[in-house]
Image (cartoon, coloured by chain):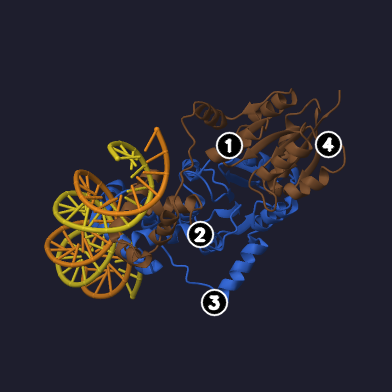
Chain colours: A brown, B blue, C yellow, D orange
Amino acid sequence: MNKIQIAIVDDHNLFRKGLIRLINMGDSLQRYNILFEADNGNQMKEKMKLSPFPDIILMDIDMPELDGFESVEWLQRTHGDVKVLVMTMLEKESAILRMLRMGVKGYIHKDIEVADLHAALESIAANGIYYSEAATEVMQQNLNGLNNTTVQLSEKEREFIKFAITDMTYQQIADQMNLSVKTIDGYRETLFRKLHVKTRVTLAMHAVKHGLVEL
Amino acid sequence: MNKIQIAIVDDHNLFRKGLIRLINMGDSLQRYNILFEADNGNQMKEKMKLSPFPDIILMDIDMPELDGFESVEWLQRTHGDVKVLVMTMLEKESAILRMLRMGVKGYIHKDIEVADLHAALESIAANGIYYSEAATEVMQQNLNGLNNTTVQLSEKEREFIKFAITDMTYQQIADQMNLSVKTIDGYRETLFRKLHVKTRVTLAMHAVKHGLVEL
DNA sequence: TAGCTATAGGGGAAAAATCCCTTTTTTCTT
DNA sequence: AAGAAAAAAGGGATTTTTCCCCTATAGCTA
């Protein structure tokens, strides 16, 4: 029986090293072999130029240069048979969805039990899939079509937001934008509804969090 | 010779487990012993109620409930002799500074070599300190007075900010914090002055930009 | 063409946030 | 223990924000 070849792509050296130890620990049959490690997607690309190729790649999302999304995209295109297990801190729905849509074989949070990590590896090695609870939930919700809808904002609304995160009063914003303060009030109201916020403060927070404005 | 007692506070289970392996790996003399692990500051508090106490605590910053800053603050107050080694992903200057000011014995990035981790432990165990390059740089810059102006906030003020970036009214915040709305108003005023902002919106923006709060 | 929708704007009022100034309570320091 | 400093709180006034309900105009479209 051939060993299952594993690669780890993560920018945190300590995490990689620790992970290797953890994998070997639960591997009394010596079924796994760590083929290579990479700091980020670019380094992984280099190592995926020549065989041998790994069977499973443990992939982080948040990395410098070439991140997890781009890396998986590249992998699907060039090495469609390599199985990807995403291991990340990110439980954000958008991240999970994006990865699921790209067809990764598993999505787990880094805060899982060692036993679960082994289960995930077993499962994937056996041609199965493994999703954390959070990921499964997101899948469920999405299949039910309850979710989605990334709101569409008008040009004016976006401009208004840029001013709304400053110290300016609505009157000053109105003057700046050459509109009535009442119109500004309308933008505010619309945005509150669209973005599900209740105050100017949370509007600002939402804008920052979703990259609508530069911090 | 007594063993050096170590505790690990980090919300990522896999990282904790891996880290333990890494520590033991380089520890041929069996000088280290992992006394306990904790998911976050609150859990750590629990475990620090009764002796034995650890000599060194490896601490992450970004954790749920009680984060690294608050945890270190608590430790300094209640267990001043415990040495803290901050291990984090955060290389943000404000984070480094804040930790340095609180007197942690070391600050290293999670992306370091295993050998460096061991060096850090050795150094701290021997009553020394260990700072990563990034942390040293920040120190240098700061000692030269080039930078500065990172104001000192009280615990209450920081807690207030966490609420101030939400939809809560000051009345609700006051109730939540078990204080008069007038006291809250005082915090607000003080913060406006300290942070040079004029409205709750820009207070929130400032807090996010300078890492005073999680987004 | 009547109807719909998006955009701009108005009146007015309640609720919150902001400001200024004073008093009480607690904590820390000699 | 007296005095100073910091933290907590109150009074009261002004500004802003937030809400609700309403009108006008232009562009589209069934």
- Which comes before the other along the chain, label 1 or label 4? 4
Q: Amino acid at mark 1?
A: Ile
Question: Can you see residue B172?
Answer: yes
Task: Determine which residue is flagged by label 1.
Answer: A96
Query: SS of the residue at dot 2?
Result: loop
The reply to the same-chain question for discs 2 and 4 is: yes
**Could you tell me how far apart the alpha carbons at marks 1 and 4 are, in whole angstroms?**
25 Å
**Could you tell me how far apart the alpha carbons at marks 2 and 4 are, in whole angstroms?**
41 Å
Which residue: 71% across, 52% down?
B118
Q: Amino acid at mark 4?
A: Phe
The reply to the same-chain question for discs 2 and 1 is: yes
Is B120 above or below relative to B196?
above
Check if mark 4's residue and mark 3's residue have beta carbons within 8 Å: no
List x then y, in percent, for residue B122.
Answer: 69, 55
Mark in the foreground, 2 or 3: 2
Task: Determine which residue is flagged by label 2.
Answer: A214
How many other residues sit within 10 Å of disc 1, few (<14), some (14-19) or many (≥20)? Answer: many
Is A71 above or below relative to A6?
below
| Host chain of mark 1 | A
| Host chain of mark 3 | B
Please name whichever residue, B128 or C13, is drawn nearer the observer in this view of the structure. C13
Task: Determine which residue is flagged by label 3.
Answer: B145
Q: Point out the image quarter for the N terminus of chain A.
A: top right
Check if mark 3's residue and mark 1's residue have beta carbons within 8 Å: no
| Left or right side of B88 for A56 | right
Query: SS of the residue at dot 3?
Result: loop
- Which comes before the other along the chain, label 2 or label 4? 4
Q: Amino acid at mark 2?
A: Glu
| Left or right side of A125 for B214 | left
Which of the labelled discs sits on residue A53, or is there none? Answer: 4
Mark in the foreground, 4 or 3: 4
| Host chain of mark 4 | A
